[in-house]
Image: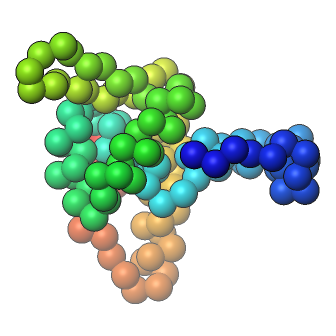
C-alpha cells in the first residue's frame, strides 16, 4: 500500500470533514463499492471465505482479500483461522460491525423506495434482509 502524506491538502480536508460531519467517519469505514456488500452478507452470520466468494461472484479474489483485511483492521469483522489443512478461515462481524445493521437496513429501505419511484425492482425484498 502507498504511504499517506499526512500534511497534504487532501489529508487536511479529510480531518476537517471528520470534525464537521460524522457521516464522513462512517463513509471512511464502510465506503466504497464492496465493503457494504461484504458487511451485508455477514449480517446473517459467520461465513467462510468460499461462501463470500459464492455470494459475491463479481468480486475478484484480490479485491475481496483487500476489503476483508481493511474491514478487519477497522474492527468491523473478525477473521478466525483454524490451523488445519486445508485452511479453514471464517469471517464474522464484531459488535461494531453488527452495529451497522440498522445503517445497512436504512440503506436497503431507501434503495427499495427510490427504485420503485424510478421503475426498477430488486430480486430480494426487505423481508429477506439478513439477520
Q: Is residue 26 visible?
A: yes
Query: Seen in the image, is 57 located left or right of residue 65?
Result: left
Q: Is residue 127 visible?
A: no
From the viewer's side, name the closer residue of 66 and 71. Answer: 66
Q: What residue sits 51% from the left and 38% below the top?
A: 70
Residue 129 rendering spot, x and y as whole percentages: 32, 48
Report the coloring of the rendering.
Answer: rainbow
Q: What residue sits 39% from the left and 53% below the top?
A: 63
Residue 87 rendering spot, x and y as whole percentages: 16, 25
Instruction: In the displayed orientation, state which residue is furthest to the front.
Output: 2
On screen, residue 114 above or below 20: below
Q: What residue sits 26% from the left and 56% below the top?
A: 56
Q: How many marks?
A: 0
Q: Quadrant of the C terminus?
A: top left
Residue 53 rendering spot, x and y as whole percentages: 22, 50
Instruction: In the displayed orientation, state which residue is furthest to the bottom.
Output: 119
Query: Seen in the image, is 127 located left or right of residue 31?
Result: left
From the viewer's side, name the closer residue of 56 and 121. Answer: 56
Instruction: In the displayed orientation, state which residue is furthest to the top.
Output: 83
Q: What residue sits 20% from the left and 33% below the top?
A: 48
Residue 45 rendering spot, x and y as whole percentages: 27, 30
On screen, residue 76 above or below 118: above
On screen, residue 76 above or below 121: above
Q: Quadrant of residue 29?
A: top right
Amino acid at each position: 500500500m502507498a504511504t499517506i502524506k499526512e500534511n497534504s491538502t487532501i489529508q487536511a480536508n479529510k480531518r476537517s470533514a471528520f470534525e464537521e460531519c460524522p457521516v464522513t467517519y462512517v463513509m471512511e469505514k464502510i465506503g466504497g463499492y464492496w465493503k457494504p456488500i461484504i458487511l451485508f452478507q455477514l449480517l446473517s452470520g459467520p461465513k467462510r471465505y468460499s461462501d463470500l466468494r459464492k455470494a459475491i461472484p463479481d468480486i475478484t479474489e484480490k479485491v475481496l482479500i483487500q476489503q476483508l483485511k481493511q474491514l478487519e483492521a477497522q474492527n468491523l469483522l473478525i477473521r478466525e483461522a483454524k490451523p488445519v489443512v486445508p485452511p479453514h478461515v471464517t469471517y464474522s462481524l464484531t459488535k461494531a460491525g453488527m452495529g451497522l445493521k440498522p445503517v445497512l437496513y436504512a440503506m436497503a429501505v431507501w434503495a427499495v423506495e427510490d427504485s420503485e419511484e424510478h421503475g426498477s425492482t430488486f430480486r430480494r425484498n426487505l423481508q429477506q434482509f439478513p439477520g
